[in-house]
Image: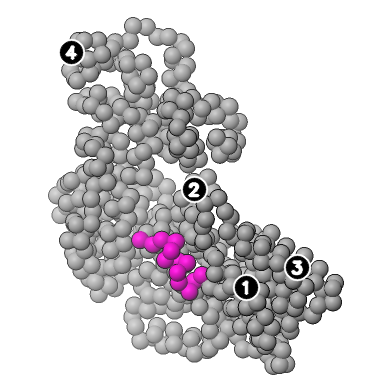
């Protein structure tokens, strides 16, 4: 790398050097080796070697890493190396002092009415003249945001033909009714791009799969290899540096947040849809209600809080990627989903004032995707041998990602022991139901209001429970602790809880041992942040 950097010493323009070094830093972006921090090994190793070289090429490398380094510690280490080499009398190339020294001029968003992707165009000017004494032209950084993949960056590129680019965007917006090209506040562009950079980095590094590192990221139909294999890798370091040059919102003005859709707000939206004329022809109201809940969840959680946005690409992503990998649909819901989705497209398209031609194109995508959906969607619970009754009990919300931790919390819900019993008697969302499940799980007894016939014969009689003969205070206290733990496991809060349980199970510890350890940490924690720290240490 240091030998290759020698050729950069002859460069005259700092932008050329920035692009070259960004590509160099991106050459190992996202690389993973078991037990090795590749970013630290190569990034800090390059800095150490450049400092030890005692050559102008090494000083150029350090200047580039100081401006474009992917972490504060990396940039600080490179800056210290620069100081050491300058003290030895080495002279940096002319462009080194201008790396990263740019001022934001304007920001624009280029896209269409469907809103699947946005091209965010950020225009910058150089703070100092070029080495030839002439003021260099402005340049534009274009970052492509893919909203169907959870707001990730999909591509990036740079051009110095700024006026030509802007005029082409304006011309397209004038001639295409579905196209849009709008000015964006610089501080708003920073908020938007900072979120996208963070999400993309977490997916590439694998942090998105680790709940202890922050909120989960749900990339749909995209992998880390798709990101690192594109030109985004060679521009990512430059993009991160440029976004930091954009201004923060004025003091006292909060950055534009992603809309938060809490459970009650989602329920209101679903109720309004189900009461609409577009939903009037849906014959199975229960299946329709479940289906629309999934449609809204996809829009809120994946599409940056925009459940009303509809498009052909979003429909395909929802039916062919998100649903098969995220949701367990009952047979009646599988049959109803395309019809509910079509009704939703008509209703949401009207509310968001989407042109009729765009609504029609989206409806065509729904019906064209039905056959592919039928062949693509395979009930993910079927290979586990779960009956439909067990699926209904374990996944009332259809959230397949929660299946493992819910089975861990209440294993009897997947067994035949509770088959035939009224659902409300073992409902895990009520204290009475949780208590009944845990008492039967731990002690093989259950205090029922009315006896039921069943398949469990622990006492040799034709009943599935052993009557409670008396309340043991110690047992009741233990059930209190386990009920608090089981409710948290059921809800998945905090995410660190199930992550800690998985680590312990992977080490060969049995379920009672894991439950006891988790319960102890839950009882000892003084706050939610303290609980998360304790769980991460398990």
- Percent of width and height locating residue 7: 65, 83
Ranked by sequence position, the earlier of labels 2 and 4 is 2
Ranked by sequence position, the earlier of labels 3 and 1 is 1
Asked whether 439 or 116 is in front, the reply is: 439
Looking at this view, name the residue that lies furthest to the top: 469
* Magenta-tinted stretch: 221-233
Calculate the distance from the C-alpha at mark 1 to the C-alpha at mark 2.
Answer: 32 Å
Q: Which residue is mark 2?
A: 210
Calculate the distance from the C-alpha at mark 1 to the C-alpha at mark 4.
Answer: 77 Å
Q: Which residue is mark 3?
A: 52
**Label 1–label 2 contact, CB within 8 A:** no
**Label 1–label 4 contact, CB within 8 A:** no
- What's the mark number on residue 1? 1
Q: Secondary structure at mark 1?
A: loop
Q: Residue at x 17, y 46 (%)?
A: 332
Is residue 229 covered in magenta? Answer: yes
- Percent of width and height locating residue 215: 49, 50
Q: Residue at x 75, y 68 (%)?
A: 51
Q: How is the image coloured?
A: one colour
For the C terminus, give its image quadrant.
top right
**Residue 102 seen in this snapshot:** no
Q: Secondary structure at mark 4?
A: loop
- Percent of width and height locating residue 247: 63, 69
Q: Which residue is mark 4?
A: 462
Q: Is residue 503 above or below residue 29?
A: above
Q: Is residue 205 above or below residue 95?
A: above
Q: Residue at x 27, y 59 (%)?
A: 320
């Amino acid at each position: 790398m240091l030998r290759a950097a020698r050729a950069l010493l002859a460069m005259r323009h700092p932008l050329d050097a920035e692009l070259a070094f960004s590509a160099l830093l991106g050459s190992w972006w996202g690389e993973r080796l078991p037990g090795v921090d590749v970013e630290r090994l190569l990034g800090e190793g390059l800095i150490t070697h450049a400092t030890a070289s005692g050559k102008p090429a090494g000083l150029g490398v350090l200047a580039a890493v100081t401006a474009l380094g992917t972490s504060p510690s990396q940039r600080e280490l490179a800056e210290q190396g620069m100081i050491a080499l300058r003290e030895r009398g080495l002279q940096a190339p002319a462009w080194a002092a201008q790396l990263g020294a740019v001022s934001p001029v304007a920001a624009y968003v280029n896209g269409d009415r469907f809103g699947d992707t946005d091209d965010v165009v950020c225009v910058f000017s150089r703070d100092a003249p070029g080495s030839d004494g002439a003021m260099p032209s402005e340049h534009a950084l274009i970052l492509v945001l893919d909203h169907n993949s959870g707001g990730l960056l999909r591509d990036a590129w740079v051009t110095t033909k700024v006026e030509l680019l802007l005029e082409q965007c304006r011309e397209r917006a004038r001639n295409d009714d579905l196209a849009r090209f709008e000015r964006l506040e610089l501080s708003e562009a920073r908020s938007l791009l900072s979120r996208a950079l963070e999400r993309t980095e977490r997916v590439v590094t694998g942090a998105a799969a680790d709940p202890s590192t922050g909120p989960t990221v749900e990339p749909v139909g995209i992998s880390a290899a798709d990101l690192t294999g594109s030109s985004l890798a060679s521009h990512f370091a430059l993009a991160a540096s440029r976004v930091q040059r954009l201004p923060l919102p004025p003091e006292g003005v909060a950055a534009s947040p992603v809309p938060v859709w809490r459970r009650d707000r989602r329920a209101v939206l679903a109720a309004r849809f189900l009461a609409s004329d577009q939903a009037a022809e849906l014959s199975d109201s229960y299946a329709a209600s479940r289906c629309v809940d999934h449609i809204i969840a996809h829009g809120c959680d994946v599409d940056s809080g925009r459940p009303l946005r509809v498009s052909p690409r979003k429909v395909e992503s929802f039916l062919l990627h998100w649903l098969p990998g995220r949701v367990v649909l009952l047979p009646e819901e599988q049959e109803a989903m395309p019809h509910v989705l079509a009704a939703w497209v008509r209703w949401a398209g009207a509310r968001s004032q989407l042109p009729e031609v765009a609504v029609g194109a989206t409806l065509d995508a729904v019906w064209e995707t039905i056959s592919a959906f039928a062949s693509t969607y395979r009930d993910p619970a079927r290979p586990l041998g779960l009956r439909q009754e067990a699926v209904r009990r374990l996944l009332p919300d259809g959230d397949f990602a929660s299946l493992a931790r819910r089975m861990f919390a209440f294993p009897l819900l997947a067994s035949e022991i509770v088959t035939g019993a009224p659902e409300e008697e073992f409902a895990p969302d009520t204290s009475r139901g949780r208590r009944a499940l845990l008492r039967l799980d731990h002690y093989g007894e259950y205090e029922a209001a009315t006896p039921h016939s069943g398949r469990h014969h622990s006492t040799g009689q034709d009943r599935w429970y052993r009557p409670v003969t008396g309340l043991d205070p110690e047992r009741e206290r233990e059930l209190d602790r386990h009920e608090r733990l089981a409710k948290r496991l059921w809800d998945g809060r905090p995410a660190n809880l199930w992550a800690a349980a998985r680590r312990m199970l992977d080490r060969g510890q049995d379920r009672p041992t894991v439950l006891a350890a988790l319960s102890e940490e839950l009882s000892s924690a003084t706050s939610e942040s303290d609980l998360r720290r304790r769980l991460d240490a398990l």
